[in-house]
Image: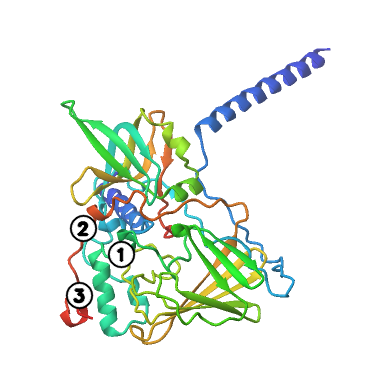
């Protein structure tokens, strides 16, 4: 009998503790929010789907990577070492195969800080439009590929029906593109790009790196889908006026079918330009600057 | 903490700061004093949830009662959304006291780049790019 009461007390105590824990957890939930971007699939086992004509279907919402939020690592401090208290140790443009005069000009553009076309409300253009924490939606249709970029709220419609470049195309930010299949890889060939845009520093093009190019820029984008959840993009920038040889960069993108696309107009509320202070130029060769 | 450990702490924070990324379309170093952590405490008066950067307007009051109007620049709306911070979250803070950690503008204007919000109840809302994430 005594054991029976004891069992009852134990059950009651367990119920009270469970209720208490639930309440505490609920309160903790109300005060704690998980600040983390969505996860992406690491599964490489599922094969890429194919369209009726047998080619891989590149359609989908793709993102290279998500940006994560963080708190101030130096909160409470009054001063910490600055990575660029002097001149930068390395320039992003140094990774590109610029001719000597062009390398110098790229450094000067970088040092000036406020020379980035984006700060002047101009478009990203090809190839800078790719990569980073902004998704791109690819829609593969018979005879054309449509790419909708979140970055810059931009789009491209690229013929894949075997036609040649339009010989009368005007120079433009996104250029004059046609594409054809090379096995399971779609190769987009782009010419007639204006010389106003920057190439960016590879896949992450945000930094004002001074990576200018000429009107001779020829871009080849090789896109493949090695498995269901991943896309590979390889870009070759060929510009004989400023490079010693073509520059190749590549990266992978992740399928994010449930991702929303946000508006990303460049200059809706631009306030940075008036606060940008140029650093003292490191490169002072006037002959280079004149080019 | 001994002076030696403070030295390690400062170097560690410096390394973390060195990993702070570029903004969506320009360099943090071009506009802000990245070597000088700053704390701004005041009333959040307005949220400009717009591109290319979110801005928060904050009114501070000094010891003499003088009110100053500050502008705090943040990441793009898409970046904040995907990191778990929404416009609704921020609008709910309008009229409330907030403490914002960030970096002051180089040009001496009342502008700061915001890295996190600390609310009166102690909750911390990250709004800056995670150290080491170079993606924007």
In this view, the residue farthest toward the front is: A168
Image: A99 above or below A30: below
Residue at image coords 40%, 80%: A217
Quarter in which the N terminus of chain A is drawn: top right
Task: Tell me the residue that label 1 is attached to.
Answer: A116
Q: State the mark number for residue A277.
A: 2
Residue at image coords 32%, 64%: A117
Q: Secondary structure at mark 2?
A: loop
Whether residue A88 is visible: no
* Left or right, B135 with reference to A106: right
Q: State the mark number for residue B75.
A: none
Question: Where, by quadrant of the figure, is residue A281 drawn?
Answer: bottom left
Around disc 2, counting alpha carbons within 10 Å, would you say few (fewer than 14), some (14 to 19), or many (20 or more)?
some
Quarter in which the C terminus of chain A is drawn: bottom left
Question: Where, by quadrant of the figure, is residue A41 drawn?
Answer: bottom right
Around disc 1, counting alpha carbons within 10 Å, would you say few (fewer than 14), some (14 to 19), or many (20 or more)?
many
In this view, the residue farthest toward the right is: A1
Residue A113 lies, in percent from the top left, at 26, 63
* Left or right, B14 with reference to A233: left
Q: Secondary structure at mark 1?
A: loop
Task: Tell me the residue that label 3 is attached to.
Answer: A283
For the residues labelled 2 and 1, the Cα–Cα distance comes to: 13 Å
User: Label 3 marks which chain's residue?
Assistant: A
Residue A114 lies, in percent from the top left, at 25, 62
């Amino acid at each position: 009998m005594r054991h029976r009461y004891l069992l009852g007390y134990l059950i009651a105590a367990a119920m009270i503790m469970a209720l208490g824990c639930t309440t505490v957890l609920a309160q903790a939930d109300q005060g704690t929010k998980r600040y983390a971007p969505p996860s992406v699939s690491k599964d490489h086992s599922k094969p890429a789907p194919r369209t009726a004509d047998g080619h891989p279907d590149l359609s989908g919402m793709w993102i290279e990577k998500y940006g994560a939020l963080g708190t101030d690592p130096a909160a409470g401090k009054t001063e910490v070492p600055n990575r660029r208290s002097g001149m930068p140790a390395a320039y992003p443009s140094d990774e590109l195969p610029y001719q000597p005069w062009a390398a110098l000009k790229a450094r000067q553009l970088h040092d000036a800080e406020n020379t980035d076309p984006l700060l002047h409300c101009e478009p990203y253009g090809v190839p800078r439009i790719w990569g980073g924490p902004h998704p791109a939606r690819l829609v593969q249709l018979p005879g054309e590929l449509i790419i909708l970029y979140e970055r810059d709220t931009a789009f491209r419609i690229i013929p894949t029906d075997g036609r040649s470049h339009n010989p009368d195309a005007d120079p433009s930010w996104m250029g004059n593109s046609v594409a054809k299949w090379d096995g399971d890889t779609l190769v987009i060939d782009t010419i007639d790009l204006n010389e106003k845009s920057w190439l960016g520093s590879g896949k992450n093009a945000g930094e004002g790196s001074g990576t200018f190019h000429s009107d001779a820029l020829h871009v080849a984008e090789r896109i493949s889908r090695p498995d269901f959840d991943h896309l590979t993009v390889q870009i070759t920038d060929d510009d004989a006026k400023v490079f010693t040889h073509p520059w190749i960069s590549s990266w992978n993108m992740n399928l994010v079918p449930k991702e929303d696309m946000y508006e990303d107009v460049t200059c809706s509320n631009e306030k940075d330009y008036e606060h940008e202070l140029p650093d003292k130029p490191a490169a002072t060769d006037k002959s280079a600057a004149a080019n | 903490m001994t002076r030696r450990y403070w030295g390690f702490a400062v170097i560690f924070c410096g390394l973390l700061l060195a990993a702070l990324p570029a903004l969506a379309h320009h360099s943090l170093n071009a506009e802000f004093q990245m070597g000088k952590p700053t704390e701004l405490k005041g009333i959040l008066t307005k949220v400009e949830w717009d591109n290319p950067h979110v801005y928060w307007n904050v009114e501070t009051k000094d010891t003499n009662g003088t009110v100053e109007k500050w502008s705090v620049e943040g990441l793009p709306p898409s970046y904040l959304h995907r990191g778990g911070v929404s416009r609704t979250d921020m609008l709910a803070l309008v009229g409330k006291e907030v403490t914002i950690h960030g970096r002051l503008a180089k040009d001496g204007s009342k502008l700061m780049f915001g890295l996190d919000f600390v609310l009166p109840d102690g909750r911390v809302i990250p709004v800056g790019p995670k150290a080491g994430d170079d993606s924007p």
